[in-house]
Image (spheres, grey):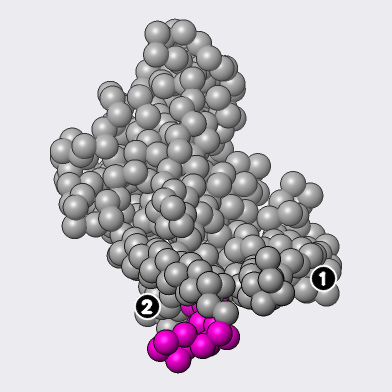
Amino acid sequence: MSVRQTVLISLLTAAISGCASSGYKSASGTDIDPKVYAQAQQRVIDEKIPDPLKDEFIAWYSEGPQNSVLHSMRAGLHAMRLGYYDIAKNCFDSAIRDVQALQAGSDQAKRSESKFVAEKEKWFKGESYERSALYFYRGLLYLKDQDYGNAAACFKRSELEDITGDDEPGFQGDWYSDELALALASYLNGYPGDSDAALKRAATYKSIQGKVPPPTPMTNTLIVVEVGTGPIKYAAGHYHEQLRFREDPPATVGVRADLPYQQTLVSAAAENIYFQATTRGTRQVDYILKGKANFKEGTTVATAALATAAIATTDVDKSGITSGALALAAIGTAITSALTTPEADIRSWNNLPHSVYLLNLNIPDNIQAIAISGLDANGKTTVQATVPLITCNNGKAKPFKIGFIYLNN
């Protein structure tokens, strides 16, 4: 190989290759300034964040607005499961404020339309199922506080966030769990007509997973059971431009509550979040990413052609084009191709469950805990746990109890 050929290939390789970096990385893959990271660590100490939640909060505080919604979602659900309900409410409220601000038409969110800006570099606001889950969980905490009006509003907003593409219109706003929870909130708030309407809507949904005993005017206890691991995002396609979801099906496909006086209640899942993630249809950003991938494919082909011509040319050809000119053109298209970023954003609310069960009960006031069993497809027990009940009595005429449990099974 001639010196000229070696130089040309080296230039092309340098143009296409990126530069390595080190240090702390954000969920978007960008570097975090060590000083900023240290400040986030100190802030977590100053705010006395509980040890199990420190990692989420450090990530939240160090990565800035690009990933604030992502980390406040994760931290909020983790805090809720651990019983830090005030922290969970603050996290979810922060995420809701940021999501609403982004949906209001932020110019920054439009950056990902550029061929040279990766989708993961935009400020994260979640896919439609993640935003629906955000309002759903916030609604559950409003139920715990006996703020039934705001609870109902959250469940309604959760349905609105369940946006689908034109190719999947039948799955828009079909969170079965939202309608069940809305029916309960309406019963507790003294609006049985709203409850009946919610249950009628729920009965038409394609998202139904099986028989779920609904709330009634006599319901005085709700047990929320989360099971398994939620949708796993990954990128497919030649340039990783296609967002896909992988399911990790849990062994538990049903739940049984062992009630006083030998009674039992068996329920299917009120929500399958993997189902919700995979029935959204084509997103607007999918068209943008496909266009980026097509552009990158075109520039890659052009780079190869120009590089081949440059190496083959030794002197001025009959057209008067020198090998140096061809090399510069090849380098230019190589740089353009390298800077084109069609990759799908696979940042995710990664501690969502696979399924959510809502057990609506009417039990005596003296019962403080309920035994729960997970069931497999054959009705055999997969896991057992006892759910402590929280008595909510904020001056309401009718006391209400609620319990939360997560089963990683």
Q: At which x and y percent is residue 337?
A: 49, 72
The magenta span reads 315-337
Q: Is residue 62 left or right of residue 95?
A: right
Pointers 1 and 2 in contact (CB under 8 A)?
no
Q: Which residue is mark 1?
A: 34
Q: Which residue is mark 2?
A: 104
**Res. 315 mark:** none
Q: Is residue 320 placed above or below 12 in the rendered structure?
A: below
Q: At which x and y percent is residue 215?
A: 30, 34
Q: Is residue 190 visible?
A: no
53 and 184: which is toward the camera: 53
Q: Secondary structure at mark 1?
A: helix
Residue at horizontal 17 percent and vertical 47 percent from the top: 170
Q: Quadrant of the C terminus?
A: top right
**1 vs 2, front mark:** 1
Residue at horizontal 59 percent and vertical 52 percent from the top: 74
